[in-house]
Image: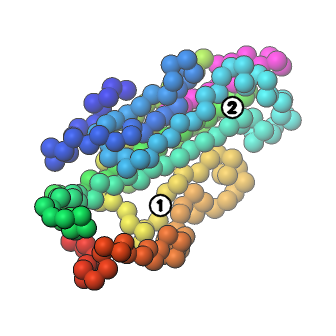
Amino acid sequence: MSQDLLPQFAGQPLVNPPVAVPSSNPSLGPDTVGPGIPTGGVQEVYADVTSSAVTASYTPPQPGNLVGEYLQYRLTTHYIEDLGLRAIPVGGPPGTPQQVVRLHAGTFYKVVNFLVSRAISLPVLPSSDTQNANETLYARRISPATPSDLPDGNVAWIVSGQYIYLMRVGPTEKDILMAGISPLAQLNNTGSTAGQLPPSVWNQNLIGPSPLPAAAVGLGLSPITF
């Protein structure tokens, strides 16, 4: 995908690490999308599954063992937010607090990366239709590799892809996040809530309470809530 796939929002040149996606050719390196997505440091590179790697690790599954046919199923969902806040430096001696202002209401994105390899049968791939009116598909990339020949005469399919969605309203820690589910879990009848991350997973005591810097003690700083 081109480096200007996504537009710049609010006139701000967002120069951040791009979201990396799988490359079907290791000599080319990972393909990237950016810099329009304010990834905030989110970066992901799936290991390439080459024909030689598939052939070397392949063990023929028992007849009818659909789970054994899948050599790899990786599905990762990123929820990316630019909350619309910006910092303004203030003149003064070291320790003078900078000001925080709201430039806009925020922009929200959802990026889904997947990498699937399956022997014998065609792989089951995630559709880009999330059945959610809040998510608008902006761009997608599907990269099927040439089927690899296996020692037993079968072939292995390797498919990678990425979907990018614009979200009109972004999720918070009070919302359920859809992480996705693989066909393997569906075969095991894991239920309709499989692949969902509930609000109960968040714990405020893991990275907080965070102590104030010494220079901020006594300044009476209030949390930014606008």
Left or right: 140 as drawn, with respect to 205: left
Quadrant that contains the N terminus = top left
Residue 29, above or below 116? above
Q: Nearer the viewer, residue 101 or 108?
A: 101
- Residue 10 place in picture, x, y as percent: 16, 48
Disc nearest the viewer among 1 and 2: 1
Is-magenta flag for residue 215?
Answer: no
The residue identified by callout 1 is 177
Q: Residue at x 32, y 80 (%)?
A: 217
Residue picked out by circle 2: 118
Between the C-alphas of marks 1 and 2, the distance is 27 Å
Q: Residue at x 52, y 31 (%)?
A: 22
Residue 26's quadrant in the figure?
top right
Q: Secondary structure at mark 1?
A: strand
Image side of residue 84 versus residue 200, left or right: left
Q: Amino acid at mark 2?
A: Arg
Q: Residue furthest front?
A: 93
151 in the magenta segment: yes
* Residue at screen point 35% across, 75% down: 214
Image coords of residue 4 (percent x, y): 27, 30
Per the rendered image, the range of residues in magenta is 147-161
Q: Quadrant of residue 222?
A: bottom left
* Rendering coords of residue 38 (x, y %): 32, 46
> Can residue 97 be seen by looking at this rendering?
yes
Q: What secondary structure is the magenta-colored segment mainly?
A: strand
